[in-house]
Amino acid sequence: MRIAYLCADRGITLGGSKGAAVHMASIVTALARCGAEVLLLPRRVVGGAHRDLPRDASVDPLPEAATDAALADLLEERLSEFGAEALYERFSLHTAAGAAAAGRLGIPYLVELNAPLPEEAARYRFLERPGEADRLEREVLSSADSVLAVSGPLARYARERGARHVEVFPNAVDPALFRAYSNHSGLREPNCVFLGALRPWH
């Protein structure tokens, strides 16, 4: 199956060290391990990022400055050329280009929801064009064939925003990353420690 993965968020860089960047690469890797041919469409890429992806995944960066309408046209073109059978999008603020392109092509559209982004941005940072952000979020969630929310509260949020079909799809750990350590440490099962930054919105 050919799956396109879209991340239109300019703050998430393929090859970066932020949790969102690692999560993006991990989802693409998991899809490829399941036998899918994956086309990754990020806004930003740093050098050498392709090395972290499996052979069955290709990267085609999107222009950072494109308007939403232009981005929808470009996505439709690239998805068509790839022969995409589904579009998987990591939800981003201020865009419904993925929803528009998937709708035009008539392919399944899945949206991964990691946070109530308009609320989070308004409360902890600065939300540009709040009315537009609200409208586009509702458009994306209501257009999706399935919304994959990382928690129960986010699943409820998605339903309140118009999502028709919602599944809880929790964040996870790839146990293969820890097997080598476990085998050499004398532990029967690996002990996992979280190392990262807990921000106020978390």
Image: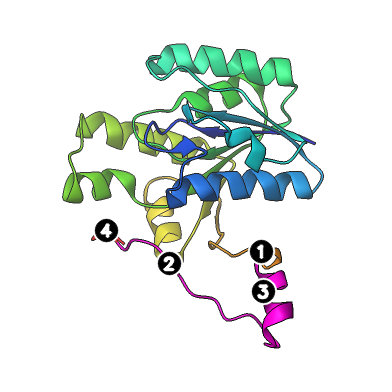
- Quadrant of res 89: top right
Residue indicated by mark 3: 181
Dot 1 and dot 4 residues touching (CB under 8 Å): no
Q: Earlier in the sequence, mark 3 or mark 4?
A: 3
Residue located at (71% from left, 27% from top): 84
Q: CA distance from mark 3 to mark 4?
A: 32 Å
Residue indicated by mark 1: 177
Residue located at (20% from left, 31% from top): 128
Closer-to-camera residue (117/183): 183
Residue indicated by mark 4: 201
- Quadrant of res 64: top left
Q: Earlier in the sequence, mark 2 or mark 3?
A: 3
Q: CA distance from mark 1 to mark 4?
A: 28 Å
| Residue 196 on image: x %, y % | 39, 62
Badge 2 amino acid: Leu
Residue indicated by mark 2: 195
Badge 4 amino acid: Trp
Name the element at disc 3. helix
- Does residue 5 show up? no
Q: Earlier in the sequence, mark 4 or mark 2?
A: 2
Badge 1 amino acid: Leu
Between tags 1 and 4, which lies in front?
Answer: 1
Badge 3 amino acid: Tyr
Q: Earlier in the sequence, mark 1 or mark 2?
A: 1
Name the element at disc 1. helix
